[in-house]
Amino acid sequence: DQQVKQNSPSLSVQEGRISILNCDYTNSMFDYFLWYKKYPAEGPTFLISISSIKDKNEDGRFTVFLNKSAKHLSLHIVPSQPGDSAVYFCAGDSGTYKYIFGTGTRLKVLA
Amino acid sequence: DGGITQSPKYLFRKEGQNVTLSCEQNLNHDAMYWYRQDPGQGLRLIYYSQIVNDFQKGDIAEGYSVSREKKESFPLTVTSAQKNPTAFYLCASSRAKATEAFFGQGTRLTVV
């Protein structure tokens, strides 16, 4: 049972435009969500998180939106830069120390 | 310079041999984790530990074992019982629940 789903394996965006990465979850016990960025052969780097008591969290060019009724979250990157090209993972946590990750979306920002 | 150190970065082993992957953190985090990544798949949780001398199975614990004798160390042993051990292994730690986890640089294990 895949509790966190990233249904788009890849996404291409022009430099300067908005990148929107989506994530759906099935576990209604998740109360904390995270986004990570990962380059090949490296460990993931934390980007931004959101608690389930909020519907939006912003940090510089990165904004995460949470729609609890739809069990959906999205990561917006504005403006997109070539250095943003990487694989992005979303993860959910139900307060049990078990971070459950999605399968990732590969973002390519075209110069 | 605080962080998580995984060693070695690349590891080769013969089929049937046990191998231990090292993970050390100096972030003073209570919780530590082991994940596995396969091509086209996300990060799957192998084991996690909330505190010293305690650990729990994750979603794919079969064929793996861990220990948590010290706060800063969480070694993972890949045993010969693991059917598909070739993968990229990631160690992480977190300060508490509902906080971000920090990852090491990973160990790529290849079993031949």
Image (tube, coloured by chain):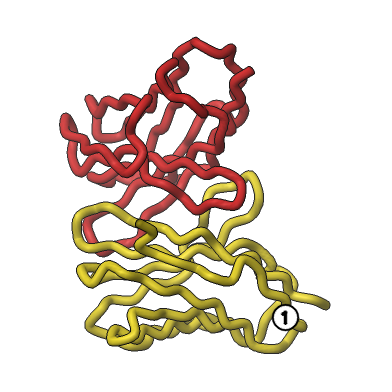
Chain colours: A yellow, B red
Measured from the top left, where is residue A42 in percent x and y?
A: 59, 47
Q: Quadrant of the N terminus of chain A?
A: bottom left
Residue B26 seen anywhere in this rendered image of the structure:
no
**Horizontal and vertical percent position of residue A60:** 52, 83
| Residue placed most toward the observer, A43 or A25 | A25
| Helix, strand or loop for disc 1 | strand
Q: Name the residue at the front extreme.
A: A1
A44 sits left or right of B82 in the view = right
Q: Quadrant of residue A39?
A: bottom right
**Which x, y percent locates residue B83?**
47, 25
Label 1 resides on the chain identified as A
Against A69, residue B52 (above or below) is above
Q: Quadrant of residue A107?
A: bottom right
Residue depicted at x 28% and y 70%? A32
- In depth, the one of A96 and B62 nearer the eye is B62
| In this view, A9 is above or below A59 | above
Residue plotted at (32% across, 44% down): B59
Q: Is residue A87 left or right of residue B23?
A: right
Residue B32 appears in the picture as rendered: yes
Q: Report the residue marked by disc 1.
A: A13
Q: Nearer the viewer, residue B92 or B13?
A: B13
In the rendered view of the protein, which quadrant contains the C terminus of chain A? bottom right
Position in image of residue B18 (x %, y %): 45, 14
Looking at numbered disc 1 in the image, what kind of residue is underneath it?
Answer: Val
Task: Indicate left or right for B40 with A65 as reference.
Answer: right
Label 1 CA crowd tier, 10 Å (few <14, some 14–19, many 20+): some
State the residue at coordinates (32%, 70%).
A26
Up-down relation of residue B39 to residue B7 (above or below)? below
